[in-house]
Amino acid sequence: MIFSITDQCLDPEALKAELTRESAGAFVSFEGWVRDHNDGAAVTALEYEAHASLASKEGQQILAEAVERFDVLAVSGLHRTGHLAIGECAVWVGVSAAHRGIAFDACRYIIDELKQRVPIWKKEHYRDGPSSWVNCATESAVTEV
């Protein structure tokens, strides 16, 4: 069970291999990719920043909650920081469990909690306009040209 913040590219196949268990009947993962649009604006790239030590600690707590709540066999989560191009994987969550329902439920719980609780900030770079931090409590105050 590990949650990490990294500035390195994510390798979903290698991450999946780390969660292989003989007792697992199911594996579910979530990959969050950088897309080329948001709210009608053309996006050219994303930039992520995190309070790494707090983000890692809270991410670990969320994984521990998922293990306890859903009785899964293995979990892992990683989130990128730095400049990411369109198509790159920004966040990855994986769950191995005895049964598919548990794996799906745990994976959804983990990604939803990570998005809500972990101190990671996203800046969108737009084709036609200024860059902007999004999903921040002070979003309008931190828009820049």
Image: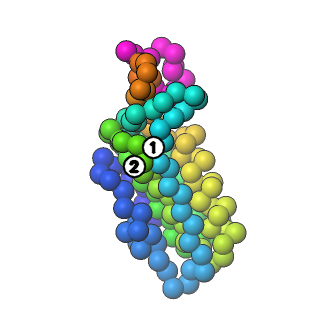
Q: Is residue 145 left or right of residue 33?
A: left
- Crowding at dot 2, Cα within 10 Å, few <14 / some 14-19 / many 20+, comes out as some
Q: Tell me if I can see residue 40 in this picture.
A: yes
Image coordinates of residue 7 in percent, x first then y, are: 30, 47
- For the residue pair 76 and 145, the one nearer the viewer reads as 145
Figure check: 72 above or below 35: below
Q: Residue 119 colored magenta?
A: no
Q: Position of residue 139 (x, y in %)?
A: 51, 21
Q: Is residue 141 magenta?
A: yes
| Image mark for residue 88 | 2
The answer to which of marks 1 and 2 sits earlier in the sequence is: 1
The magenta stretch is: 133-145
Outermost residue, right direction? 101
Please, is residue 136 above or below residue 62 in the view?
Answer: above
Amino acid residing under circle 1: Val
Q: Secondary structure at mark 1?
A: loop
Image-quadrant location for residue 15: bottom left
- The label on residue 81 is none
Query: Which quadrant does the C terminus fall into?
Result: top left
Q: Residue at x 67, y 61 (%)?
A: 105
Which residue occupies the foreground of this view, 12 or 110?
A: 12
Measuring 60% from the left and 75% from the top, which residue is drawn there?
26
Cβ atoms under marks 1 and 2 closer than 8 Å? yes
Q: Can I make out residue 52 in this image?
A: no
Amino acid type of disc 2? Glu
Q: Residue 34: which numbered mark, if any?
A: 1
Q: Secondary structure at mark 2?
A: loop
